[in-house]
Amino acid sequence: MRSQVAKIWHTAGGLSLLEHALRAAEAATSSRPIVVVADLDDHLLANLAERVDLVHQADPRGTAAALAEARPGLVGEKVALVLPGDMPLLSPGSLQSLVRTIGERGVGAAVLTATVSDARGYGRIVRSVDGGLAGIVEDADEPWDGTPAEVNLGAYAFAIDGLWDALDQLTPDNAQGELYLSWLPERVRGGAVTVAVADLDEAIQVNDRVQLAQAEAALQGRTQRRLMLAGVTITDPSATWIDCDVEVGQDTVIAPGTVIRGRSRIGSACLIGPFAELEEVEVGNGCRIGRSHLSGCKLADGVDVGPFNRVRPESVLGRKSHLGTFTEVVRSRVGEGSQIPHLSYVGDAEVGSDVNYGAGSITANWDGQVKHRTVIGDGARLGSGTILVAPVEVGESAYSGAGSVITGDVPAGSLAVSRARQRNVLGWVARRRGKTGEEVQK
């Protein structure tokens, strides 16, 4: 991967490669997954210790040696499902077929395969005269000849009975000096069969950034197809980016250039985009979101967010509230029907319902050390260019004059004006420049 980040932590479809593998395994079986890793780092422990059994392979001697490390955790099991952590499109259905085949066919192993046009990097299936599985040849030992080939996808089901005896027979007599998992099927008691995937996208493996992009494209197609078949309009799928965990309601339209990430939830009959960016958001029904960036926030039904706004985490926009353009909201609640038209900042604030937040107004929420809150009561009207120096409270139906700097609480129903009286100094420009008034006018 040419990266400082371990391959399993690279992401596709908004999830790590390892997360894709774990979800497929969890959906295909009822057992707690065992994850065998060469580097038992703090990141793994912090994120997976409660979910999986982590096994440290101190001496990485190949994939079969990794399986051997998991042996204590497989005591009492009848079948072991083994899959790689770098194939994010493997489906639970294919993995269940592997497990089911062990019982139905009474064999010792089932191998997941696909026929691909580019077999570089894959182990290739070798067939016997009668069409059975004779073995698997690794690319490192016998380079691919350039023709379409049936390949091993690295996912297996093994009958535990006889597995360990077969594993003990393996030797590192190969180009990489490793114990190959792919050499086990031909050695297990009961023989081995293959199971072909129905969807060739499942064969995408990730060993470099090119393949990572291929996996991303395939996952995008899978996610967008799911949403469109559920009643979502995606006007240009090729120009839209939606993570795997995103949910969108019926009759919502997603316009080109839109990016929706994380576990975002979007209601029905919304219009999203063009060029909107949403991350970990909850959006109600009937909302409109233009070319804006929303992250970690919640929108009630009927909210309208125009272009070039930013709504940051811990913010809630109430029903039928409105953001015009060039406005930022962070750690704030905006009440039902309130309007924040443009060029404003709302930080650490409680904005009531039916508030008109005049253009260019801001909450001055930080005193250099601590951030303070501002409270604006229902029905208040802020004149353009109002600066609210927190902590401060504006009462219900109160007004502020345009250009005011509000440093104290404003009682309900009052008008607050805090600005110097305008003074015009006649002839000032001419005197400053050392010229007569007539010369200035010319």
Image (cartoon, rainbow, N blue to C red):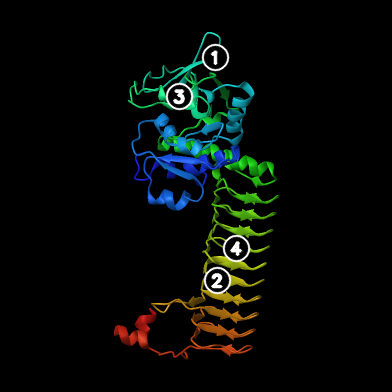
Cα distance in 3D space between marks 2 and 4: 11 Å
- Disc 3 vs disc 2: Cβ atoms closer than 8 Å? no
User: Which residue type carries mark 3?
Assistant: Asp
Q: Secondary structure at mark 4?
A: strand
Q: Which residue is mark 4?
A: 298
Cα distance in 3D space between marks 3 and 2: 63 Å
Q: Secondary structure at mark 2?
A: loop
Instruction: Determine crowd level at label 3: few under 14, some 14-19, many 20+ residues with C-alpha closer than 10 A.
Output: few
Q: Which residue is mark 3?
A: 165
Q: Nearer the viewer, mark 3 or mark 2?
A: 3
Q: Name the residue located 51 percent from the left edge and 20 percent from the top edge.
A: 189
User: Which residue type carries mark 4?
Assistant: Lys
Looking at the rendered image, the quarter that the C terminus falls into is bottom left
Cα distance in 3D space between marks 4 and 3: 57 Å
Q: Give the number of the disc on residue 251.
A: none
In the depicted view, which residue is nearer to us: 200 or 187?
187
Q: Give the number of the disc on residue 132.
A: 1
User: Which residue type carries mark 1?
Assistant: Gly
Place of residue 84 in the rendered image (x, y in percent of width and height, measured from the top left):
47, 34
Cα distance in 3D space between marks 1 and 4: 57 Å
Instruction: Determine crowd level at label 1: few under 14, some 14-19, many 20+ residues with C-alpha closer than 10 A.
Output: some
Cα distance in 3D space between marks 3 and 1: 22 Å
Residue 271 is left or right of residue 117, and the answer is right
Q: Name the residue located 63 percent from the left edge and 50 percent from the top edge.
A: 247
Instruction: Determine crowd level at label 4: few under 14, some 14-19, many 20+ residues with C-alpha closer than 10 A.
Output: many
In the depicted view, which residue is nearer to us: 223 or 376?
223
Q: Secondary structure at mark 3?
A: helix
Q: Which residue is mark 2?
A: 332
